[in-house]
Image: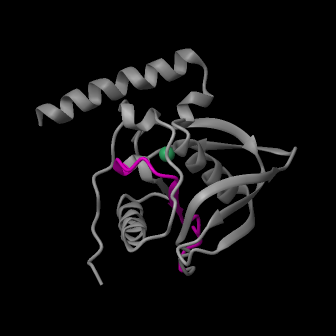
Amino acid sequence: MARMSVKPILLHPDPRLKKACAVIESVTPEIGKLAEDMLETMYDAPGVGLAAPQVGVLMRLFVMDCVKEEGAAPRPMVLINPEIVATSDEKNTYEEGCLSIPEHYAEVTRPKRVAMRWIGLDGKLQEEEFDDLWATCAQHELDHLNGKLFIDHLGTIKRSMITRKMVKFKREQARG
Ligand code: NI
């Protein structure tokens, strides 16, 4: 068993975060290793979700764990080729953030519940209905696989303000 490793997370703006990702044709051991590394990277950050393009892999896979109750058992989930099969008319607004846009948060309104279908690490088709934070997270991560960030749900002014600050942040980071 290969050791898990924390991967560097790409920061916005980055062209790789704007690309539609490719369907995964088969669940290989490499995909398994990628999923393990992504979970490790997500918990280390810490965050509740992470999509493959955020670690520079342009494939349709994301991980999430929205268990937040103190002392509750974690529920690491790996979703390969996820699709939305149904959404509720009822909406929900959450203050969202993203590991690729650190320290920026904004309210985004999305369907309160979504039914999703995906392939698990065992290669089997799975379906589940997500609610509240789980639903928001699943939709946010699925957006990543289509090259969309949460700031793309905001108005132009707010979005360009955050992008400008991120460009500056990355420049400063590069200088060290
Ligand atoms: Ni994100």
Query: At 75% across and 59% down in the image, what residue appears?
Result: 131
The spot of residue 70 in percent (x, y) is 54, 74
Q: Is residue 92 above or below residue 85?
A: above
Which residue lies most toward the bottom here? 1
Q: Is residue 99 above or below residue 2?
A: above
Quadrant where the N terminus is found in the figure: bottom left
Question: Is residue 98 highlighted in magenta?
Answer: no
Quadrant where the C terminus is found in the figure: top left
Q: Is residue 163 above or below residue 87?
A: above
Q: Main secondary structure of the magenta part?
A: loop
The spot of residue 15 in percent (x, y) is 37, 31
Is the image coloured rainbow, by chain, by secondary structure, or in one colour?
one colour
Question: Is residue 56 highlighted in magenta?
Answer: yes
Q: Dividing the picture into quarters, in which one does residue 91 lie?
A: top right
The spot of residue 39 in percent (x, y) is 42, 67
Query: At 47% across and 18% down in the image, what residue appears?
Result: 160
Q: Which residues are magenta?
A: 55-71
Q: Is residue 13 left or right of residue 156?
A: left
Q: Dividing the picture into quarters, in which one does residue 65 lie?
A: bottom right
Which residue lies most toward the front here? 25
Which residue lies most toward the top here? 157
Q: Is residue 42 above or below residue 15?
A: below
The spot of residue 42 in percent (x, y) is 41, 61
